[in-house]
Image (cartoon, rainbow, N blue to C red):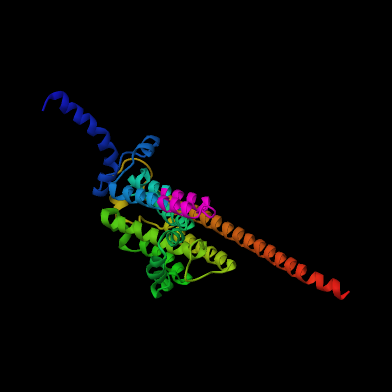
Amino acid sequence: MPRHVHHRAVAGLVPALLLVLPSTVAAHGLAALPLDAGTALTAWSLEVHIWLPIVLLALVYGAGVRSVGRAHPANPVPRRRVLAWYGGLSALFVALQSSIATYDTTLFSVHMVQHLLLMMVVAPLLVLGAPITLLLRVVSPSARKRVVLPVLHSRAARVISFPVVAWVVFAGVMYGSHFSPLFDAALENEFVHLLEHALYLGAGLLFWWPVVGADPSPWRMPHPARVLYVFLGMPWSSFLALAIFSAPGVLYPHYATLQRDWGLSPLADQQLAGGIMWVGGDGLFLVAVVAMVAAWMRAEEAEGKRADARLDREGARHGPAIARDQ
């Protein structure tokens, strides 16, 4: 190989290695490069098994939106749902491909940010995108009747979407993952790490499905129950955050044995992670509670307008009869 070609190949490999290095070496007991403004902007993973499904979800949803727009120009998919879906996919891409993913096995605090994104940002936004409703509008009537609706009305769907079950699964995943060997195993094994991400995202989707109410569900929650449902998630998140924050020692051997000579100590980083979960988690739950209350008020207002319109129609019908009687 000519020397100039060899030099060009090496020069081309260096930037790629700098991007791959943090996520690669962290799994083998060595710390990533120091996290600073530069690495936060450049240390992206760009793994095909992550970004390709996200791109496919974006393309399929967009095709469905266009199909509905062509078939029902007077009743297209609401723009807020489209924005929510693509916002959720964008947050998912950031959580799993940005420097957050690169440093999640190096810093517990970064890992906590990733989990909050998956469960408290990505999941509700994707549910707000109403993909089930879009699917029902796109598929043929026969497919809707023979496949989609039977699945939605199946016993399994009724069980997993039951609000109490969904709430318990959500809380159970948070506590079970943090207080079991799963968390540390996910830091050491890439496949287990992907499984953990799927678990967090799945529990989040299950949790927000009945409370958001954008898609049809076997269970329909009244608005006061939705507010209570979300509000009760806050103390459970706070208790877990407090347990992490106040732990006297490092909870996960991976972070304790990682060779890193920069940043916070493993225990201080763990305390920061607990603080992020405490403040960030409670803040996101409060935002959700406010949104649920606002939706409740809008529903009450709409119901009041419908009642007034009904009374007006009845008055219009009975008005001539009353005038004749007089």
Q: Which residue is drawn at 19% across and 30% down?
A: 9
Which image quarter is the N terminus in?
A: top left
Image coordinates for residue 43, horizontal then vertical, percent: 33, 39
**In the rendered image of this protein, does residue 235 appear above or below residue 34?**
below
Residue 58 falls inside the magenta stretch: no
Tell me if I can see residue 138 in this picture: yes
Asked if residue 160 is positioned above or below residue 1 in the image, the reply reads below
Left or right of 64? Residue 4 is left
Residue 183 falls in image quadrant = bottom left
Magenta segment range? 62-89
Q: Which of 205 and 278 is in front in this view?
A: 205
Residue in the picture at 31% in, 39% down: 33
Q: Does the magenta stretch include residue 72?
A: yes
Q: Which of the 4 image quadrants contains residue 139?
A: bottom left
Q: Which residue lies furthest to the left in this view?
A: 1
State the image coordinates of residue 122 (x, y, percent, origin top left). 44, 53
Residue 202 sits in quarter = bottom left
